[in-house]
């Protein structure tokens, strides 16, 4: 009864907050940031206490698109946003600024306490929620493991087993029955199985080789923990979610339950690995958890935190990238034809040595992520007053956010043809052979995998997984949106999503040719 009353009181508070802010808006003549307002007429107005929070909150589902609109109107690629209680956030698309915060002044721009505070309940002290010596220690451990040939071979085997044993048989059934299914959901299940096998050596079997798909308590808890933790960042006033957490009510109650499920499951796996090591003196499995435990890292909390961080990193990123990739391919038949030509020239199974020669698929994936990066924005916090390369003064504790989503839509970076889906911008022809070779971009111009000391350790493995899936699926099937003219909505939690999923049919290829469709994407 007491808990219900507390939840009711908080609900009343949440109901009246917008009215309070409206009163402030109508009664106050404070405009704020008049100097910056000359940059763009689209800039949100700033009010006492709440800053521009109402405008930001109203755009939280389309923050990437909204920020892109602001930045495209900015002459220097920077926009200053005012958060509650005087906190500042500078958003930028300037590659020089990105290099400054991710590399040149790396230790002056950590993730900071704000990020850590919001995600600590879920990620603990894991590598993606850590700074300083703790981050450096975990990074060194993980970097060593990720660079071993045995782990790469293990990842290759895991991906191949999941593809041939589950995904392709599922597509056989879907094609035969002309079924409509959510491709995003299927790819998320595929990715979750993969990353759990790689991280824990555990197969949650979220993806079944036939319909209907199973329900996994662990997977559902992980999804809820990710979604609700991310939602904390969208709170107009942070004390609200902290109060809900303190009284264990509402979304924070579900978050606590979800995190408990995830951590209890993960901790049990850690204990099981430690028992196996005690009994056998060595672990034969190749997963990350086994490697960490075998290396002498026996602290349960430490190992659990770092492995959960890797699951967060690998769970939705590749599935998000592939979801948008298949939508773009469905709307760009010329690119589809080029991919099919390349697939016919390569062996059916692609290992690490062969993947680097699948140039057009690699380029197409990079071009897709230019438009729809799995992590559309990332923020670091200044530990002291600082000046960016473009002369912008950054005050202590200001958040500096670089936005790959907006950078991929910036004419100054990609040219006037930036709206065109053109994989060829990632390739060049060799002078002697005349064959195409992949042409990478500066990581600070294209920070989809971050850059500098925090650059994604799993980048190569992610491409292996994505390229193998693309080749395996497109070799046999054409992915067709179930709804003609389907216009998906890009949103994000900790990583990108296609809101409402991606309903598709798959058609078995007869002649290897693609259907006619549009060739450009819009800016949304």
Image: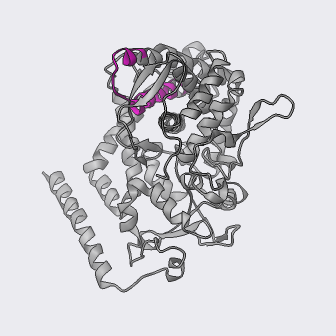
Residue interval drawn in magenta: 172-198
Please tell me which residue lies in front, 56 or 111: 56
In the rendered image of this protein, does residue 417 appear above or below residue 395? above
Q: Residue at x 62, y 29 (%)?
A: 338
Asked if residue 195 lies in the magenta stretch, the reply is yes
Q: Is residue 424 visible?
A: yes
Query: Looking at the picture, how far across and down is residue 218, in whole percent?
Result: 37, 30
Q: Residue at x 38, y 72 (%)?
A: 50
Q: Quadrant of residue 166?
A: top left
Query: Looking at the picture, how far across and down is residue 255, in whole percent?
Result: 33, 44
Asked if residue 111 lies in the magenta stretch, the reply is no
In the rendered image of this protein, does residue 118 appear above or below residue 372? below
Please tell me which residue lies in front, 454 or 247: 454
Please tell me which residue lies in front, 1 or 240: 240
Q: Residue furthest left?
A: 1
Q: Quadrant of residue 5?
A: bottom left
């Amino acid at each position: 009864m007491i808990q219900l009353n507390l939840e009711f009181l908080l609900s009343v508070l949440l109901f009246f907050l917008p009215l309070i802010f409206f009163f402030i808006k109508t009664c106050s003549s404070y405009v704020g940031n008049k100097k910056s307002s000359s940059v763009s007429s689209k800039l949100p107005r700033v009010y006492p206490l709440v800053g521009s929070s109402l405008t930001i909150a109203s755009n939280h589902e389309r923050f990437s698109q909204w920020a892109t609109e602001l930045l495209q109107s900015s002459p220097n690629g920077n926009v200053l946003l005012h958060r509650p209680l005087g906190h500042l956030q500078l958003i930028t698309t300037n590659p020089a600024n990105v290099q400054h915060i991710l590399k040149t002044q790396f230790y002056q721009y950590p993730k900071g306490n704000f990020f850590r505070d919001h995600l600590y309940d879920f990620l603990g002290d894991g590598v993606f929620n850590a700074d300083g010596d703790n981050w450096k220690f975990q990074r060194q451990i993980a970097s060593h493991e990720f660079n071993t040939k045995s782990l790469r071979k293990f990842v290759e085997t895991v991906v191949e087993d999941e593809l041939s044993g589950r995904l392709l048989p599922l597509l056989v059934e879907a094609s035969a029955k002309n079924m409509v299914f959510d491709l995003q959901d299927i790819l998320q299940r595929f990715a979750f199985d993969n990353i759990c096998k790689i991280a824990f050596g555990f197969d949650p079997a979220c993806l079944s080789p036939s319909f209907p798909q199973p329900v996994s308590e662990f997977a559902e808890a992980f999804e809820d923990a990710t979604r609700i933790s991310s939602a904390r960042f969208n709170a107009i006033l942070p004390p609200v979610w902290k109060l809900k957490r303190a009284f264990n009510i509402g979304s924070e109650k579900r978050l606590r339950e979800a995190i408990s499920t995830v951590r209890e499951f993960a901790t049990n796996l850690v204990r099981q690995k430690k028992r196996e090591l005690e009994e056998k003196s060595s672990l034969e499995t190749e997963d990350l958890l086994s490697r960490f435990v075998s290396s002498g890292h026996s602290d349960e909390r430490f190992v659990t935190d770092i492995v959960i961080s890797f699951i967060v990193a690998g769970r939705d990123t590749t599935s998000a990238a592939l979801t948008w990739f298949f939508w773009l391919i469905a709307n760009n038949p010329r690119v589809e034809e080029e991919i099919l030509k390349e697939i016919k020239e390569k062996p059916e199974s692609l290992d690490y040595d062969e993947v680097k020669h699948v140039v057009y698929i690699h380029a197409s994936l990079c071009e897709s992520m230019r438009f729809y990066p799995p992590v559309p924005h990332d923020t670091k916090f200044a530990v002291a007053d600082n000046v960016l390369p473009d002369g912008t003064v950054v005050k202590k504790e200001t958040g500096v956010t670089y936005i790959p989503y907006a950078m991929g839509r910036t004419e100054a970076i990609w040219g006037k043809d930036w709206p065109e889906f053109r994989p060829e911008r990632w390739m060049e022809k060799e002078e002697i052979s005349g064959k195409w070779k992949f042409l990478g971009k500066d990581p600070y111009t294209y920070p989809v995998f971050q850059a500098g000391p925090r650059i994604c350790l799993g980048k190569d493995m992610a491409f292996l997984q994505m390229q193998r899936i693309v080749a395996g699926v497109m070799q046999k099937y054409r992915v067709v949106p179930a709804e003609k003219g389907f216009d998906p909505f890009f949103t994000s939690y900790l990583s990108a999503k296609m809101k409402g999923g991606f309903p598709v049919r798959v058609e078995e290829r007869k002649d290897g040719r693609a259907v006619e469709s549009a060739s450009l994407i819009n800016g949304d």
